[in-house]
Amino acid sequence: MTANQGQTEDFLRETHKAAEHIREHVAKGQTVLVISHMDADGLSAAGIMGVALKRLGAPFRIRIERWFDENVAQEIASEKNCLIVLLDMGSGYLSILNQELKGRPIVILDHHQPDGEPDEAFVHVNPALFGIDSARDLSGSGTAYFTAKALSDRNMDLACIAIVGALGDLQDKHENRSLGGLNSLVVEDAVQAGTLAVETDLLLFGRETRPIHKALAYTTNPFIPGISGEEDKSLAFLLGLGIKPKEGEKWRALRDLSHDEKRKLFSALSDHLASRGYKSDRAMSLLGTIYVLKREEPWTPLRDAREFALLLNATGRTGKPGLGVAICMGDRGHCLEQANAALEEYRQTITKYLRWIEEHPDLFEEMTSIYVLHGGESIDEKVISAVSTILSTGMPNLEKPIIAYSIIPDENIMKVSARTVDVLTRKGFNIGEIMRIAAEKFSGTGGGHDVAAGAQLPLKARNRFLKHVDELVTRELRRIRESGS
């Protein structure tokens, strides 16, 4: 779904309403309490809002949460004489907010599927409310950016951070792996502000910073079996193609390859994926649109927007989200050094889990209409969403949703991450709605988007929950078949 001019104008009017609400409360001397999610989109949104509030001269605090639930709502309710701004969360938990914070001044800047109607005291800005595809055309950081821009045109230089958030949320689902919809307006602002260049190239992780064989090994979207996570095999792959990994004593990065070398590499990767049973479109996803942050130093992980997004995810998933927010707000010193260390820790953790899953195929259970990854206590809940995303791109010819879960033993909670494929969502399938319905049935919370969603619920309901999800998916797939979609 692409936003038409009327939808876009209506949405932007709402961002101006939110900006005016923020401005009024700041004028009264109130502190702004910003609460955002721990992933790349949430951290980008927090960084954007932090800079905008700082420029406004507003006193503010930023708090990052791994998810939203009754406990978080109750803690927020205890805050007095402040304006609460929820970023990249809140829309899916309106019933909780209505119950715990009725009548309180709250601004919600989100893009997840709304759950009901907000209290009349809330200002709720969400592209989905205007018929805009909020899983592909605008992220939470994009919503925060347009609100920041409504506060001041000076904040147009923050558009590049919203692009990082959108890419972290895997919204590059338009032609040539590009950002589209309202995200394209964010791209235009970033180019106009002189902070962004848009190119076409191979989508290997670390194209600006890593030796070619490491760029290959670090690439997990799409997952390349036998190469992703395997530096030695990646090096051997390049040598077998006659591509020199070094020029003298200096390692070569992807950006150092000639056009012919890149063409040879792409052709070989296509053949490699085909030999593993993947369709041709999987190989094509290795080629696409590159977003280069022009004001960032070359040879740093902030130069390429996708690599920037992974760095942010790493800080959030390794328990250091404050580093990610600081970097989005402009810190390029000690925080960046620590974030780079977190990125290496995160990469090693993900690689370890992927190898462990490969060595334990019994962790996968195929039910009637879903695949289940029983991560249990063996996979850290902080990275279960990243693992499920990689698996959803790494399984050849996937036609069923993947439901992956981890257990948080100290809390007796299971954290669920669900992914499906575009071929189903184009027919009206919505994994976010299924997660919401199934989680609520067992005293949990859930939701998200049609293609990616999550849930948290009591561990004791695990088997009943998975069975119910399978039944809901089976029922929905039957409806799609019968409707001829």
Image (cartoon, rainbow, N blue to C red):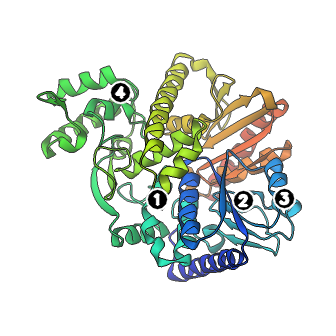
The image shows residue 51, relative to residue 301, as above or below, that is below
Q: Residues within 10 Å of mark 2 (few under 14, many from 20)?
A: many
Which label lies toward us, 2 or 3? 3
Please name whichever residue, 446 or 209, is drawn nearer the observer in this view of the structure: 209
Circle 4: residue type: Ile
Labelled disc at residue 90? 2
- Residue, disc 4: 227
User: Cα distance, mark 4 to mark 3?
Assistant: 49 Å
> Which element type, helix, strand or loop, lies under badge 2?
loop
- Image coordinates of residue 428 in percent, x first then y, are 61, 58
Residue under label 3: 77
Compute the Cα span from label 3 to label 1.
30 Å
* Disc 3 residue crowd, few under 14, some 14–19, many 20+, Cα 10 Å: some
Q: Earlier in the sequence, mark 2 or mark 4?
A: 2
Under circle 4, the secondary element is loop
Quadrant of image for the C terminus: bottom right
The residue drawn where x is 61% and y is 41% is: 401
Asked if the residues shown at circle 1 and circle 2 are in contact, with their CB atoms under 8 angstroms apart, the answer is no
Q: Looking at numbered disc 2 in the image, what kind of residue is underneath it? A: Gly
